[in-house]
Image: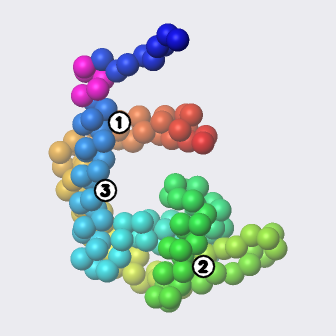
Amino acid sequence: MTDDTRWLDEEEQHAWRVYLRGTALVMEALDRDLQQHGVSLSEYEILALISESPERHQRMSTLAAAVVQSRSRLTHTAARLERRGWVQRRQSPHDKRGVELCLTEEGYAVVARLAPIHVAGVRRVLMGPLGRRSFLRLGALLDTVANGPAGAE
């Protein structure tokens, strides 16, 4: 049996490790900012996405894909948000099998209160060190990844 694996060379391995560490540090910092206000980054991301949707509701399956969570995990997160009074679940009026999450007024107020904190964190941990041009380039590069094989899985 032959080994046909194309191993990462030293520079590629370094870039991969730095990517992993950098991503973890960014996510941890942004999560920590929000945790000080009783909300996880994952919860905030869901609330923010719904707040940006027309009429402030979105299908659970669409949300799961957008936040890269299994439907089961999203269901658990939605239950926590529902207990807090920030979202309500309802049957989709367009598809009786579909379930939508609807942002309540209280949930919208949470997003409005936390958005400046989140944006300040993004500016602090990403845009500050990278600068606007590199930040936008990073977004374009990661968009390529999201629309490639990893995004299709």
Q: Judge whether residue 58 can be spotted in this image.
A: yes
User: Counting other residues with Cα less than 10 Å from the Cα at mark 2, is it few (<14), some (14-19), or many (20 or more)?
Assistant: many
Q: Nearer the viewer, mark 3 or mark 2?
A: 3
- Residue 13 in magenta? yes
Q: Which residues are magenta?
A: 10-14
Quadrant of the image containing the C terminus: top right
Query: With respect to residue 114, does 126 lie above or below?
Result: above
Residue 63, labelled with which disc? none
Residue 27, labelled with which disc? 3
Q: Nearer the viewer, mark 2 or mark 1?
A: 2
Which numbered disc, 2 or 1, marks the residue that appears first in the sequence? 2
Q: Residue at x 29, y 26 (%)?
A: 13
Amino acid type, mark 1: Arg
Residue 137, labelled with which disc? 1
Q: Nearer the viewer, mark 3 or mark 1?
A: 3
Residue under label 2, please give it.
102
Q: Quadrant of residue 113?
A: bottom left
Amino acid type, mark 2: Cys
- Residue 118 in magenta? no
Q: Residue at x 24, y 69 (%)?
A: 33
Query: With respect to residue 10, does 105 lie above or below?
Result: below
C-alpha gap between disc 3 and disc 1? 19 Å
Whole-percent x, y for residue 67 in the image? 50, 58
Residue nearest the viewer, comparing 152 with 126:
152
Q: Residue at x 41, y 76 (%)?
A: 111
C-alpha gap between disc 3 and disc 2? 26 Å
Amino acid type, mark 3: Met
